[in-house]
């Protein structure tokens, strides 16, 4: 009887070690797959060129405020009442950028203010009220891209919107 118990004990230890080896191997593969997925997700969450934005020191930043609040008609369906958005806009400018001397001074930007407002209006008016409410950060990014396209430069690196009202 003792020999039978000893034989079953040895078989149990061998099967447990085989099971342990197979589970550890599978666990390593699962951990590697999770690491790959999180790496891919992190790549999608970063915005190309965003590294530059965070490197601009506050002392190297000049803020240009658009003089008046902007009231922009939003996209609406046919027959629906016209919706509007009203907000104030500020542009953050990198004073150390090579194009700052060309466009960056407040007087120079003031002369381009109507063009800037037109670019902002064209961008915002393509959206509905619901789109604006749901994705204000995305709207800021689109405005930033349209203003950067206007100047064909990225010396303006951030757009701030405040006092948002819908009507």
Image (cartoon, rainbow, N blue to C red):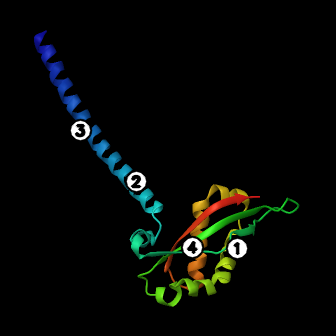
Badge number at residue 38? 2
Q: Position of residue 138 (x, y in %)?
A: 59, 63
Which residue is depicted at the point 52% across and 85% down?
105
SS type, badge 4: helix
> Does label 4 or label 2 sit earlier along the sequence?
2
Q: Residue at x 55, y 83 (%)?
A: 106
Q: CA distance from mark 1 to mark 3?
A: 64 Å
- Crowd rating for badge 1 (residues with CA inside 10 Å; few <14, some 14–19, many 20+): some
Q: Nearer the viewer, residue 97 or 39?
A: 97
The secondary element bearing badge 3 is classed as helix
Q: CA distance from mark 2 to mark 3?
A: 26 Å
Q: Quadrant of the C terminus?
A: bottom right
Pointer 1 or 3: first along the chain: 3
| Residue at the left extreme, as displayed | 3
Alpha carbon of mark 4 to alpha carbon of mark 2: how far?
Answer: 29 Å
The residue where tag 1 is placed is 121
**Who is closer to the viewer here, 108 or 137?**
108
Left or right: 24 as drawn, with respect to 143: left
Mark 3 crowd level (few <14, some 14–19, many ≥20, 10 Å Cα): few
Mark 1 lies on a secondary structure that is helix
Q: CA distance from mark 1 to mark 2?
A: 38 Å
Which residue is label 3 attached to?
21
């Amino acid at each position: 009887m003792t020999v039978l118990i000893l034989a079953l004990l040895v078989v149990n230890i061998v099967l447990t070690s085989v099971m342990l080896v197979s589970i550890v191997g599978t666990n390593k593969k699962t951990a590697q797959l999770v690491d790959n997925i999180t790496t891919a997700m992190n790549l999608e969450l970063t915005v190309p060129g965003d590294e530059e934005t965070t490197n601009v020191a506050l002392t190297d930043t000049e803020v240009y405020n658009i003089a008046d609040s902007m009231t922009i008609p939003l996209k609406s369906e046919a027959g629906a009442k016209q919706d509007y958005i009203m907000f104030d806009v500020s542009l953050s400018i990198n004073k150390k950028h090579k194009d700052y001397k060309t466009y960056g001074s407040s007087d120079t930007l003031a002369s381009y203010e109507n063009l800037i407002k037109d670019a902002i209006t064209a961008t915002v008016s393509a959206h509905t009220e619901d789109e604006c409410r749901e994705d204000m950060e995305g709207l800021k990014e689109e405005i930033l891209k349209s203003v950067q396209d206007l100047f064909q430069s990225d010396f303006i690196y951030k757009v701030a919107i405040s006092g948002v009202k819908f009507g």
